[in-house]
């Protein structure tokens, strides 16, 4: 087997996240810049300094421009979550029936087209930033990030065993983090050396590499037998049947309190995603205002924290889980404590040292998602994994719909008093996540829960086929 065939969905996943992070803060900066001189009518020479220079002019402009720019960014976030929710509802069951690879390609193609549209919008100086929302159309109608991640997770579960699933999920998390690291570090340097349209073109090229790799290298993960099995379990010609089948699979009665355990883990995953992603575009604006950070400084910091996240996920899983045999739920608890420490330091920050310590405190936060996903995937047969992962991704997207307006509202209302208070929301939500994991541990001990091994998974499939 050629060396490159050992890497499957990790390669397009990496390049997709390089694209997301290369363009994320750049779009935020472009929205602020265009809002300043197009919507609000301020001097273009002054507006171009926002995000790159720190002086009395930019400090005054930020107070005037940020509330409007925040609304545009909030709408982007909401649209990017709302429509893909409905696509993801059908994608999980559909991929269980027809295979993972087709939907991986569909989502990647949509993701590639979005930065290409931004090349056009950024080229023309007088395009209103509200028109940037048009660039989201290809990405959201193809399923967006939530659908792509749900199918990717299902693919990883297909090709791994119960024994290797924890480390594979950690490698998934690390791939995301290294994509974030690469994209965030190079974005500002490429931007300052070139321009907006060039960086969007590079981002589209990254996704194109992922598309080509998926077409020519990645095999289908589900065998014909597994797809036939799922086809015999449901006649899903009606799109609504996909949705009812997905929900029914997630909530169906199982032995040994397994349904309750799966729902607890899924809810914990959703809450953790909410807290981890809730302040994504607020954080840059917060640090720019409070500590006078520019885009380069922020992207370097973001890259550092992404590297620590990946390092903690991989080394923590390999050392603590594989070698020391510490249970997944205990490592997930360690991760929640890690990120709570991060949010506390961010809230209290009055100089750069606090922010750097907050980034260091996130070291083991990358353990939470892979450990919880590994537990879920061990509790269900392979032909149900796509459906349940779709439910968790949809739940996370729905919560994100509320997260963006909530964090924006709190930040805007406290921008001139105590702007770091938004971190309290994250602390509270991660605290709830930790509580659910503790409840899971209690039920696990009392119910005699055991993960399914390969033979039991096969028997489960055969039982479903008989039914």
Image (cartoon, grey):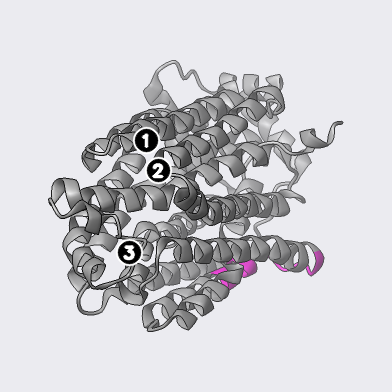
Q: Is residue 453 magenta?
A: no
Can you see residue 437? yes
Where the C terminus falls, by quadrant? top right
Which residue lies at the image location 44% right of the left edge and 15% below the top edge? 237
Callout 2: helix, strand or loop? Answer: helix
Label 2 to label 1, Cα distance in Å? 9 Å
Callout 3: helix, strand or loop? Answer: helix
- The picture places residue 142, in percent across and down from the top left corner, at 43, 28
Foreground mark, 2 or 1, reads 2
Q: Are the residues at dot 1 and dot 3 in contact (C-beta closer than 8 Å)?
A: no
First in residue order: circle 1 vs circle 3:
1
Q: Is residue 68 above or below residue 1?
A: below
First in residue order: circle 3 vs circle 2:
2
Callout 1: helix, strand or loop? Answer: helix
Residue 425 lies in quadrant = bottom left
Label 1 to label 3, Cα distance in Å? 22 Å
Residue named by callout 3: 285
Which residue lies at the image location 26% right of the left edge and 39% below the top edge? 125
Q: Are the residues at dot 2 and dot 1 in contact (C-beta closer than 8 Å)?
A: yes
Residue, far left = 41
Horizontal side of 465 relative to 433 (left or right) equals right
User: In the rendered structure, which segment of residues is drawn in magenta?
Assistant: 323-335
Label 3 to label 2, Cα distance in Å? 19 Å
Which residue lies at the image location 85% right of the left edge and 32% below the top edge? 2
Horizontal side of 68 relative to 19 (left or right) equals left
- The picture places residue 52, in percent across and down from the top left corner, at 37, 61
Residue named by callout 2: 196
Residue named by callout 1: 118
Which label belongs to residue 57?
none
Front-most of residues 440 and 65: 65
């Amino acid at each position: 087997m050629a060396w490159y065939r050992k890497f499957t969905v990790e390669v397009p996943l990496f390049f997709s996240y390089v694209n997301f992070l290369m363009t994320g803060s750049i779009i935020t900066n472009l929205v602020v810049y265009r809002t300043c001189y197009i919507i609000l009518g301020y001097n273009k020479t002054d507006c171009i300094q926002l995000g790159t220079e720190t002086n009395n002019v930019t400090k005054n402009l930020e107070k005037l421009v940020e509330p409007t720019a925040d609304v545009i960014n909030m709408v982007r976030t909401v649209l990017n979550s709302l429509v893909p929710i409905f696509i993801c509802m059908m994608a999980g069951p559909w991929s269980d029936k027809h295979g993972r690879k087709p939907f991986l390609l569909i989502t990647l193609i949509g993701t590639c087209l979005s930065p290409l549209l931004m090349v056009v919008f950024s080229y023309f100086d007088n395009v209103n930033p509200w028109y940037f929302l048009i660039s989201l159309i290809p990405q959201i109608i193809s399923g967006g990030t939530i659908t792509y991640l749900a199918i990717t997770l299902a693919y990883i579960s297909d090709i791994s065993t119960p024994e290797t699933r924890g480390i594979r999920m950690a490698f998934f998390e690390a791939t995301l983090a290294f994509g974030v690291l690469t994209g965030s570090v190079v974005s500002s340097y490429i931007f300052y050396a070139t321009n907006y349209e060039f960086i969007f073109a590079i981002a589209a090229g990254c996704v194109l590499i992922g598309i080509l790799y998926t077409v020519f290298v990645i095999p289908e993960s589900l065998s014909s037998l597994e797809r036939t099995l799922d086809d015999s379990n449901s006649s899903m010609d009606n799109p609504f049947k996909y949705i009812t089948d997905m929900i029914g699979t997630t909530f169906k009665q199982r032995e040994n309190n397994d349904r309750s355990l799966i729902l607890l883990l899924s809810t914990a995953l959703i809450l953790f995603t909410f807290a981890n992603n809730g302040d994504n575009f607020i954080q840059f604006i917060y640090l720019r205002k409070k500590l006078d950070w520019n885009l380069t400084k922020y992207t370097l910091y973001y890259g550092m924290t992404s590297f620590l996240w990946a390092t903690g996920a991989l080394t923590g899983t390999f050392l603590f889980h594989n070698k020391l045999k510490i249970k997944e739920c205990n490592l997930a608890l360690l991760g929640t404590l890690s990120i709570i420490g991060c949010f506390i330091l961010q809230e209290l920050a009055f100089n750069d040292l606090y922010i750097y310590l907050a980034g260091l405190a996130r070291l083991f936060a990358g353990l939470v998602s892979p450990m919880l996903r590994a537990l879920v995937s061990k509790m269900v047969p392979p032909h149900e994994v796509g459906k349940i992962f779709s439910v968790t991704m949809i739940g996370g997207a729905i919560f994100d719909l509320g997260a963006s307006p909530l964090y924006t509202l709190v930040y805007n209302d406290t921008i001139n008093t105590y702007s770091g208070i938004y971190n309290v929301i994250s602390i509270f939500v991660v605290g709830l996540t930790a509580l659910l994991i503790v409840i899971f541990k209690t039920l696990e001990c009392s119910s005699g829960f055991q993960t399914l091994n390969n033979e039991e998974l096969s028997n489960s499939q055969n039982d479903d086929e008989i039914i």
